[in-house]
DNA sequence: GACGCTTGTTTTCGCCTCTGAACTAAGATG
DNA sequence: CATCTTAGTTCAGAGGCGAAAACAAGCGTC
């Protein structure tokens, strides 16, 4: 029934430091003066703390701003090169590895194609480890500068150090990807579900920015969601919360590749849409979907309705401030049909929660999964900037 | 993106005091020695803090326990009579007001019948205010000893001081119940949805005890849920999260009294069950339901299936550690059909989250709503024991 | 250009909290 | 009654915060 186990006077410093660092990160270049206002800390505390951070090279000066008739403000910002984060997207058809600086600017990236149905865990792990070396050397960054590696994968990731993955549709059942990777690197690892890392990206840098209660849905080959409660991704007891794609919207409905029936994914996943439209794919799903959308087939309207039902269930159950529709299928549908999707959602929601929700499209492209994975590293950095690193660097 | 705005050294004391008080409350009579172990605080801190609490009469001694060969331990407990909480249940057919001590023992209660379709807000408010006076005088408790009044109501309660309620099925649309009550009392008020207060009760004192990620569902005339994430009730952006009864399980299905179609409530709410079974009620729904359950009608199996779908959606989306089935319909169904309900849920859930969930029956009776409402007061007390009160009392 | 005015940043000082260690309390044992 | 054991209290020290004084760095004015 709640477990805030705060304790000693040192925790305060740590906590306030995190607050300050976050303010600095998200407010761009800011003066100490602004920071006192933004954080609620006293000027004295801001002064000593920024002095620490400057000394550790986590924060750097960024020019001055004249203030009418007084001492000019010195602007401060997080040093984007203090450290780097690797973000990895393990998808159905490829493994993508990106290197980001602390501002989440991509410095290098590399892709490895996967032959469908060839998702050998060892191979994937080798791709990732090779990719890390490639992006580091491409960008001229040394491993000591890397704060961690975030990995977004399909399926359910067990909590725990081994990063064990269950992804039925991927052919992975109990694959300890984290352990496999740890054989090749000693950097901190963060393995998470890809829909969640994409959600993290949209929440921090995309359409979800600033929302504290939000749902970011991913529509693609699979269908998933990230539920954000009070600013934090909601994971549930075994980290599998958000399996929206396999919630049932038609009791005893269409069979789904998960083995169940009537799942949302069996109506609005790309394979389901094409199947229902009677399209036999020649390989390019995006083109196929464009064709369906252009055809004015009744399947389009049905899809919108089903999607509306799925979204409405989120509205009623979660009562989010914002719903972000992401994933390439989601964006492609949304670009032409967003008003219809909103209408369908409204028709199936209670009035009050619907009125409190805005439904928008994601605005990060296909790199969102890798970006979000890197953001896991950033989040950790902002929460507890390692003093150990600093002494090593200094 | 998270807002832990901790600040000064005083917050530590407040936080640690709350930790200590909670440990004391939930561990029953305990020695200071035990408390150091339970809270992680140092013996010194426990000593000074318990001295404070004893001085304020919030904590009292409760005997001794000999320890083989040393100084005996002095047991401490929260003083159950330090203060009292009023819990109110505003239901379709009655208003119930209960007075509880800090141990949540009911000291007095009173009921007021409501004629169906006669839910005049003024009348309800008068009943509540009258009820408070009655229970106080029955129990010989003075208003100064009351820490607050919790009220559980149907429908959606807007966040804010006025306790504005939207309950379509109740005929209330924008009723400021909080404001109405404040005209007759100056005690702290906590107005919340009845399904949520019931959930609170089951979470703190019933089958949900100890779970930090749980869902407590209420099946009765209406159908709702309390979602507990990390020990805290999840409310969403406008406090309406948990409207499980109006999530859709059959796209375009049976019409629901909310105006929508295919809602879970339209299949497993009591009216829906009786309607689908072709029963014309003669007024006693409990008896009617017992009749349907005894009849071996296929409606029973269907109901279990629909309920399983609804529960499975919670399992997939929320990934709770525990699902508690409450409400009189839920308990009546569960008593004979729990294994079937579990089976139906398993059939519609993903394997991993289902394996992590246990589905159990609620064990608090029909008073759970009022008890939970009073628990809102208790929760506040445990979080921030008012020093103002103390100086006034001492 | 000296002086005051304004605004931003740092330093000083007092107060608060926690903890470890020394100390006191209260019983058991022989 | 001396000693042992366990429980609880007191004290000194370290670390943290905020208010306010001090310092810094410009502008404007006479």
Image (tube, coloured by chain):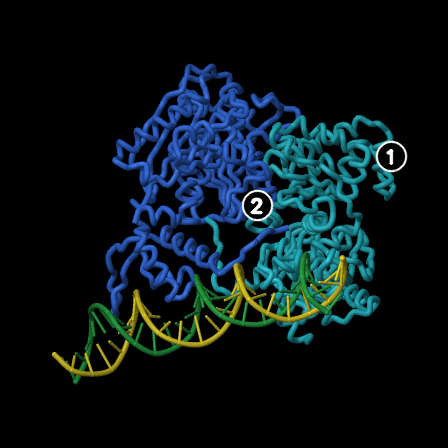
Chain colours: A blue, B cyan, C yellow, D green
At 25% from the left and 70% from the top, the residue drawn is A70
Badge 2 local density, few (<14 within 10 Å), some, or many (20+)? many
Quarter residue A374 falls in: top left
Residue under numbered circle 1: B291
Quarter residue A47 falls in: bottom left
At 70% from the left and 45% from the top, the residue drawn is B208
Depth order, front residue of A344/A60 = A60
Depth order, front residue of B96/B377 = B377
Confirm whether residue B248 shows in the render: no
Confirm whether residue A362 shows in the render: yes
At 73% from the left and 58% from the top, the residue drawn is B69
Badge 1 local density, few (<14 within 10 Å), some, or many (20+)? some
Determine whether, in the image, residue B342 is placed left or right of residue A166.
right
At 77% from the left and 63% from the top, the residue drawn is B63
Chain holding disc 1: B
Residue under numbered circle 2: A319
Q: Position of residue A100 (x, y in %)?
A: 33, 38
How far apart are the two marked residues, 1 and 2, measured between alpha carbons? Answer: 37 Å
Q: How many marks?
A: 2
Determine whether, in the image, residue B26 is placed left or right of residue A161.
right
Q: Position of residue B364 (x, y in %)?
A: 78, 47
């Amino acid at each position: 029934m709640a477990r805030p186990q705060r304790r000693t006077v040192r925790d305060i410093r740590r906590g306030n430091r995190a607050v300050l660092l976050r303010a600095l990160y998200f407010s761009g270049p800011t003066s100490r003066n602004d920071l006192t206002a933004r954080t609620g800390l006293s000027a004295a505390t801001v002064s000593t703390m920024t002095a620490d951070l400057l000394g550790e090279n986590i924060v750097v000066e960024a020019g001055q701003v004249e203030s009418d008739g007084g001492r000019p403000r010195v602007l401060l910002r997080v040093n984007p090169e203090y450290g780097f984060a690797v973000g990895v997207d393990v998808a159905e058809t490829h493994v993508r590895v990106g290197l980001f600086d602390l501002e989440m600017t991509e410095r290098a990236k590399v892709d490895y194609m996967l032959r469908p149905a060839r998702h050998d865990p060892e191979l994937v792990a080798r791709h990732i480890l090779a990719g890390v070396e490639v992006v580091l050397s491409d960008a001229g960054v040394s491993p000591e500068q890397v704060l961690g590696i975030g990995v977004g994968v399909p399926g359910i990731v067990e909590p725990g150090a081994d990063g064990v993955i269950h992804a039925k549709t991927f052919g992975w059942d109990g694959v300890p990807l984290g352990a496999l990777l740890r054989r090749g690197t000693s950097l901190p690892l963060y393995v998470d579900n890809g829909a969640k890392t994409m959600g993290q990206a949209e929440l921090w840098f995309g359409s979800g920015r600033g929302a504290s209660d939000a749902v970011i849905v991913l529509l693609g080959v699979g269908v998933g969601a990230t539920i954000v409660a009070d600013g934090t991704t909601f994971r549930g007891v075994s980290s599998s919360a958000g399996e929206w794609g396999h919630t049932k919207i038609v009791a005893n409905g269409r069979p789904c590749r998960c083995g169940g029936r009537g799942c949302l994914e069996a109506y609005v996943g790309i394979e389901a849409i094409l199947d229902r439209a009677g399209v036999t794919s020649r390989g390019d799903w995006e083109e196929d979907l464009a064709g369906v959308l252009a055809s004015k087939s009744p399947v389009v309207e049905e899809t919108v309705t089903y999607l509306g039902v799925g979204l409405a269930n989120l509205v009623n159950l979660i009562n989010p401030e914002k719903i972000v529709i992401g994933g390439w299928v989601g964006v492609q549908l949304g670009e032409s049909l967003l008003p219809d999707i909103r209408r369908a959602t409204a028709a199936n929601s209670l009035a009050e929660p619907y009125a409190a929700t805005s439904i928008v499209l994601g605005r990060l492209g296909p790199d969102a999964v890798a970006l979000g994975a890197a953001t896991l590293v950033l989040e950790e950095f902002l929460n507890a900037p390692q003093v150990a690193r600093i002494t090593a660097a200094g």
